[in-house]
Image (cartoon, rainbow, N blue to C red):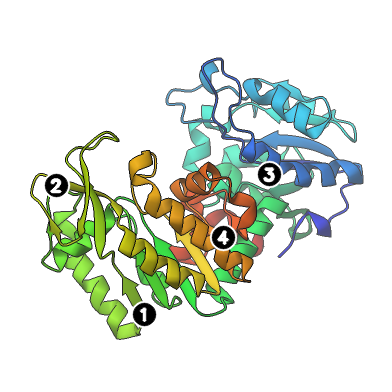
Amino acid sequence: MKTVDSINFANQCAVVRVDFNVPLNDQLEVSDLTRIKAAIPTLKKILKDGGSLVLMSHLGRPKEGPNDKYSLRHIVSSISQLLGVPIQFINDCISPEALAQSAALKPGEVLLLENLRFYKEEEKGNESFAKTLSQHGTVYVNDAFGTAHRAHASTAVMAQFFEPSKKCFGYVMANEIASITKVLTHAEKPFTAIIGGAKVSDKILIIEQLMNRANHILIGGGMAFTFIKALGGQIGKSLCEDDRLDTARELIEKAKAKGVQLHLPVDAVIADNFANDAAIQTVVINQIPDAWMGLDIGPESVKIYGDVIKNSKTILWNGPMGVFEMSNFENGTQQAAYAIVEATQQGAYSLIGGGDSVAAINKYNLSTQVSYVSTGGGALLEYIEQGNLPGVSAIENA
């Protein structure tokens, strides 16, 4: 894998695709610096070599061209503070003025281009747009794993305008690819995948792929009730995809055929309303009363899942065990997180991926106690499902 370590950026202008799609508060200030912080080591390496930087990113989902709410000018001060150098900004990304400003950069200087998605051509993967973007630098660096599953101009098309020796991955991309490859290709057994979330339909492909690799698949979250109903259980008002009952049964049969242990919860914490202050009880998961809904896995399931996790050597976690945003229904997710940390302390390799899993591991302040926390939810899932991503193959297949 070719990273920024393989290039000397002295007197080179690196055009770097970063993922600065960060949340802004009501005052349009950055409220979470995680993604910017993640890119800093890559940017500092280039500057230390004596190179200059042109940074490009998207922010939000602007529908009709330029919109100040989504302008990257709002994040200039945050980047400057973290990188330790002044940041130039231009309110465009392909104008002659923008190209002139990038061409005038001296070693050590940094230019941030305006939001790429102010142009429809970015998401359409327009080749002419990508070619113009490529003229901002002499070296192309992709460090935006969170968008690597999109075949956009700046992530998958632009790389073709650079010689193989003039394009590479940044550290974020390299670390993400290395961590996923470790889990999918070099996983030490037993390998346990913990899959939660609301819908079976969102996770069909990932479950099928993991059946070829994992020893245990633990199912939690709202999707568990589709499996329970598919097996004839009574699930009350719990979340269920009735059009996926056959799919759930097929997944159970596939797991048996492959010798993979597909674990379903045996009990559930149920409520008479979708609210933290609802009436609560714990029941066997296939005997939920009609007017009640399951919002977390129960204590017996927590114990069974915890034992499997703690005896694992490789762990992939994607999706919560319940509605962890509500304190009365967070125990399953919280205990899964603690079990993963314990397994990691005993030498297991743990990869946390997917927005809600990352939110959970951060909520419990455990991100430094697991092996790797992925920055790209959708990209991580698609990499597992497809085995590659447009933004990765654009550089690897050069």
Q: Residues within 10 Å of mark 4 (few under 14, many from 20)?
A: many
Please say if 79 is above or below 235.
above
Single out the mark in the foreground, 2 or 1: 2
x 14%, y 47%: residue: 237
Q: Nearer the viewer, mark 1 or mark 3?
A: 1
Left/right of residue 84 with respect to residue 150 in the rendered view: right
- The residue labelled by disc 4 is 341
Q: Amino acid at mark 3?
A: Ala
The image quarter containing residue 183 is bottom right
As drawn, 238 above or below 398: above
Is mark 3 in CB contact (under 8 Å) with mark 2? no
Q: CA distance from mark 2 to mark 4?
A: 33 Å
Disc 1 residue type (three-letter): Val
Look at mark 1 in the image and give the residue it sits on. 260
Q: Are marks 3 and 4 in contact (CB under 8 Å)?
A: no
What is the number of the mark on residue 38?
Answer: 3
Circle 3 or circle 2, nearest the eye: 2
Q: Secondary structure at mark 2?
A: loop
* x then y, percent, for residue 378: 46, 50
**Residue 284 visible from this viewpoint:** yes
The x, y position of residue 285, in whole percent, is 20, 60
Describe the element under mark 3 as helix, strand or loop.
Answer: helix
Alpha-carbon span between mark 1 and mark 3 = 36 Å
Q: Earlier in the sequence, mark 2 or mark 1?
A: 2
Q: Earlier in the sequence, mark 1 or mark 3?
A: 3
Q: Which residue is mark 2?
A: 237
In primary-sequence order, the first of circles 3 and 4 is 3
Dot placed on the residue nearer the N-terminal end, 2 or 4: 2
Examine the image and state in which quarter residue 54 appears.
top right
Q: Residue at x 39, y 39 (%)?
A: 325
